[in-house]
Amino acid sequence: MGKVTRALISVSHKEGVLDFAKGIEKLGIEILSTGGTAKLLRDGGVKVKDVSEFTGFPEMLDGRVKTLHPKVHGGLLGRRGNPEHMKAWKEHGIEPIDLVVVNLYPFEQTVAKPGCTLDDAIENIDIGGPTMLRSAAKNYTDVAVVVSPRDYGRVLDELKLTGEVSLKTRFELCRTVFLHTARYDSAISAWLDNQVPADEKTRFPNILTLQFEKVQNLRYGENPHQQGAFYREFGRKEPSVANARQLQGKEMSFNNFLDANSALELVKEYSPVAAVIVKHNNPCGAATGTSLADAYRKARDCDPVSAFGGVIAFNHLVDLETAKEITATFVEVVVAPEFAPEALEELKRKKDLRLLDIGPAITGTPEGMDLKKITGGLIYQDRDLGKIADIRKLTVATKRTPTDEEYEALAFAWKVCKHVKSNAIIFAARDRTLGIGAGQMSRLDSVRIAVMKAQSPLKGSVLASDAFFPFRDGLDEAAKAGITAVIQPGGSLKDEEVIKAANEQGLAMVMTGMRHFRH
């Protein structure tokens, strides 16, 4: 690379740039700059040459054209060890630019503002900045390029030590640039795509680009021998675990994130005061109540052994009474829209307990799609947001119609069912789960496990199944336990056999026509 003699600095994010410029000026490096950056540096006492003076060509088109000039890009792209390039430099009066410090117009911040128009967004699409970054990064063997203020310190340290930037550092900076510009272009593409009416949008594009930013490294992944990190998706505003604020406790683990997400997404299903407890990505208890503490006690009592060391989600402010119930046992994570000050004081007694504040608008508009990674690819789909608008309008398949209380219990159970690993069976009352059978290869086994797990008598309860009964055996087993009503999608070749079994047992059964597999 040789000694750095000339730098071009043009930044939108100006934090730290003045100190950096002062540092390289002391090393005798000439500084070129544009617009607001040049003014900031001059006002700070740094000697600056305008790029327009360097190129002999003025800024034009309201600043849209500043650095798009052969003298800039020739100075960046010319290979110092290539005689032909050096000859071209001499013929055209091009001088080297050895260091580029550029960051881009704040497109994402602009479009995040309420009332942002298409014109506002377009004016904040940077053209010259990415072009300079890419030119400098392409020629990293001869040019150092800095896009992140986080790198100012180490670049300045190397320049002070040797007068140049090491090849290793230049390569790392080059990689950072292309990651940055890829993300920048993807954010523009995603925002423009969101401006297209839903009925005109391509749901599954031929090329899928997703943007995530690393928030933190994790102690490990799903297991201690796996490494892991947590990334947040750009542009998503929906209340979520990903967007939550951690108030206290140990850092979140890989499994904490999964369980907290599962718990929150289930508790969002309920408008009344509700509590959900999740273990290993399956609910082990869910309930509504007259108070938050009442809902929590009912959810916990569904399966108190499994609830130990679980993750809890609430859909209302956590008060002192509820906090005291939480601290009475071991809990990993609590997710809630808000925590009362006195509740926080109580919860602080458990210093390792992780508290996630989602914010008061817990049921914001659902956003985005669902994806699952497979080796070498991913499967991409709509999120399962299917709901029953009016349970009383569902098809009643049996001779008997559910009572009002049964309808309420069926509606409660069906919401839980969607969030349990398939094959999923839920025994429930109108305000709580009583037994949950999850993740079995046989629906009959899920029924048996739900019965076995129940802590209360199941006589008079209802049952929800995430998919149809392939045979009558599962229904017969549930009837023995005392259920009075069933909600299930229907659609089996054996539906008539299953309906006959329900009628024989005096059960009421409604069919949703909607399956809720979860894998």
Image (cartoon, rainbow, N blue to C red):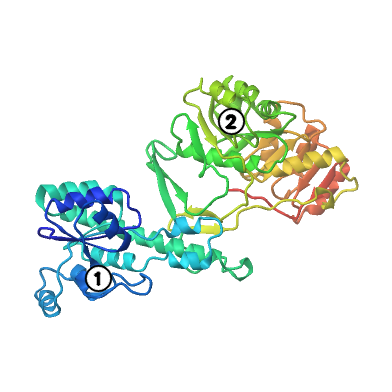
Q: In the displayed structure, does residue 372 sit left or right of residue 385? A: left
> Which amino acid lies under the numbered mark 2 shown in the image of this protein?
Phe
> Which amino acid lies under the numbered mark 1 shown in the image of this protein?
Ser
Residue 354: x and y, percent? Answer: 50, 30
The quadrant where residue 262 appears = top right
Element under disc 2: loop
Element under disc 1: helix
Q: Is residue 144 above or below residue 460?
A: below
Residue furthest out toward the bottom? 91
Residue 201: x and y, percent? Answer: 58, 68
Residue highlighted by disc 2: 339
Note whether residue 303 is visible: yes
Residue highlighted by disc 1: 52
Q: Is residue 131 above or below residue 508?
A: below
In this rendered view, identify the residue nearer to me: 374 or 347. Answer: 347
Q: Is residue 371 above or below residue 427?
A: below
Residue 161: x and y, percent? Answer: 11, 47
Single out the mark in the foreground, 2 or 1: 1
Q: Which mark is residue 127?
A: none
